[in-house]
Amino acid sequence: MRMRKKPNLIPRMERCSDYQIKDPKNWRGHWRELLSPDCQLRVELGCGKGRFTCETAAAEPEVLFIAIERVPDAMVIAMERAQAMGLKNVRFIDADVADLRDYFAPGEVERIYINFCDPWPTNRHARRRLTHPDFLERYRGVLTDGGEIHFKTDNRGLFEWSLFQFPKAGYELREVTRDLHADGIRGVMTDYEEKFHSLGTPINRCVGVKQPREEGQAADGRIFRVLFVCHGNICRSPMAEFVMKDLAEQAGLAHRFRIASAATSAEEIGNPVYPPARRKLSEHGIGCAGKTARQLRREDYENWDLFIGMDGANLRNMRRLFDGDPEGKCSLLLDHTDRPGEVADPWYTGDFEATWQDVLEGCQALLAELT
Ligand SMILES: C[S@@+](CC[C@H](N)C(=O)[O-])C[C@H]1O[C@@H](n2cnc3c(N)ncnc32)[C@H](O)[C@@H]1O
């Protein structure tokens, strides 16, 4: 958050210093002493000016809220707000989220809120996203079993990317929505949320629930079942299927994937891969013998982790068949790259080289994201 340096920051901080915890390491494992021994403890990461934490705390006085913010100029406004509201169940820490485990003991926190965190859109900066696997792993370290991360963002790219990270890091996804306020305001809004909502930007929200990890299971040890989807399953989606299989094989990761493809329409069912697509694959030493088109079925939703469509129509047809996408499994291939969008349909363009380039880039990005 860029803010002009606030005048009188120090005296202002002092005036509401009861709300600041200056020695958070000393409170590790003892936070509930601030309210009551059996209260719930929730932590907001990057609280900005604190509207969400203060209004949520006012609505739930029996819950203890700790908000972390690394910009004091923003945090002072949050502290002044808490003081003006006379809140007894809120404190603030001026710190970096990266150090969360220094401040909270294992299993001490019931819920974490991440509201409108900076999206850091380029791959180069992905590690700074507060939903990056490195951060999600840190949160696991302080959350109770079954503890929750409540995540809201206006940024669709960050949201779709994060939906992949949560399951990988051992969280079950719940309450996935891409338009939280479609039927009227739901829940307490943050400052950023109100701004984006008033501009007409849909708000994305999901909850990640911490799952127990089996003994010896690595943080990234799960198997991904990936189904590529296009209209006919004879050009783009089988290209993606066999490119992804090839990339996983080359990376020594084939055992971590189950990969296939399917059509949203019934037009080509039973037909082999379209010859120009087959030739394009074979130019790169990739075979697709034996593949015939099959249609996407409603029950596929239970049996696959990810449905990767090629264009907006594929996405709409998938969501119609599945009655929405309650677990956030559907996305577009190129949305996993730095240039989100659609893979043009070579059935109409005749340009199989462009399709190859898109499919290759998309599959490389997807593989990197999942491993
Ligand atoms: C875009 S603002 C959103 C503020 C607020 N959550 C809202 O929705 O109105 C992101 C906030 O997170 C803070 N922030 C980002 N990364 C952080 C980190 N690693 N540790 C602490 N605060 C961080 C920023 O200083 C900024 O105030």
Image (cartoon, rainbow, N blue to C red):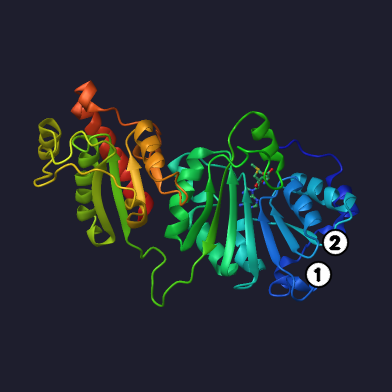
Mark 1 residue element: loop
The first of marks 2 and 1 along the sequence is: 1
Spot occupied by residue 223 in the image (x, y as percentages of width and height): 32, 61
Spot occupied by residue 279 in the image (x, y as percentages of width and height): 10, 34
Residue under the point 19% across and 46% down: 242
Some atom of ligand 1 lies within 8 Å of the CB belonging to the residue at label 2: no
For disc 2, the marked residue is: 88
- Position above or below: 75 against 199: below
Asked whether, in this view, residue 308 is left or right of residue 20, the answer is: left
- Position above or below: 148 against 275: below
Spot occupied by residue 41 in the image (x, y as percentages of width and height): 70, 66
Viewer-proximal residue among 39 and 74: 39
Asked if marks 2 and 1 touch (Cβ < 8 Å), the reply is yes
Q: How far apart are marks 2 and 1 (CA)?
A: 8 Å
- At label 1, the amino acid type is Leu
Which image quarter is the N terminus in?
top right
Asked whether, in this view, residue 130 is left or right of residue 20, the answer is: left
For disc 1, the marked residue is: 35
Mark 2 residue element: loop
Report the disc number at residue 360: none
